[in-house]
Image: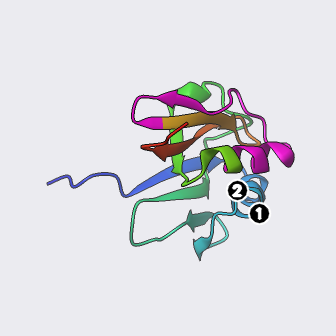
Amino acid sequence: MIKGLRISTIWSEDLTKLLPFYRDVLGMPVSLETPAFVILGDQNAAAVALGTHSEVHGKAKEPQRHIVGLETDDIKAEYARLKGVGVEFLEQPQEGGAVAFATFRDPEGNLLQLLQYNASM
């Protein structure tokens, strides 16, 4: 029986190109680290992983195919903090029904979204 999302992995030709962005800029804690694979967040819950893959080369060619959503409790503050350190946003926080979201890129062009559920904008 499939229970739901456990991990979402973003592959790179070189993990060391992405890890500093996720760990240092986004502030995601590393819970497991090997030379070629890292889990960010609680490894016993839904998490984001980064890994080196021999078949991945260069920046994402179709980054819209897979967007990782990162939950926050204050989307406006997180947007301002990340924009202030040079993160490239495609849009400022938008209200979308019961969730507010803002889409941005990592250093390899992969798309991510900040999400705040039941946000009062």
Q: Residue at x 60, y 40 (%)?
A: 112
Q: Which residue is mark 2?
A: 26
The numbered mark at residue 24 is 1
Answer with the quarter of the image where residue 97 lies: top left
x 39%, y 66%: residue = 45
Question: Residue 120, can we see it?
Answer: yes
Per the rendered image, the range of residues in magenta is 78-99
Whether residue 99 sits left or right of residue 4 in the image: it is right
Q: Residue at x 78, y 35 (%)?
A: 88
**86 or 37, nearer to the observer:** 86
Left or right position of 109 against 6: right
* Disc 2: CA contacts within 10 A as few (<14), some (14-19) or many (>=20): some
Cβ atoms at labels 2 and 1 below 8 Å apart: yes
Count up the numbered dots. 2
User: Is residue 4 positioned above or below 28 on the image?
Assistant: above
Q: Amino acid at mark 1?
A: Asp
Residue 97 within the segment the image draws in magenta: yes
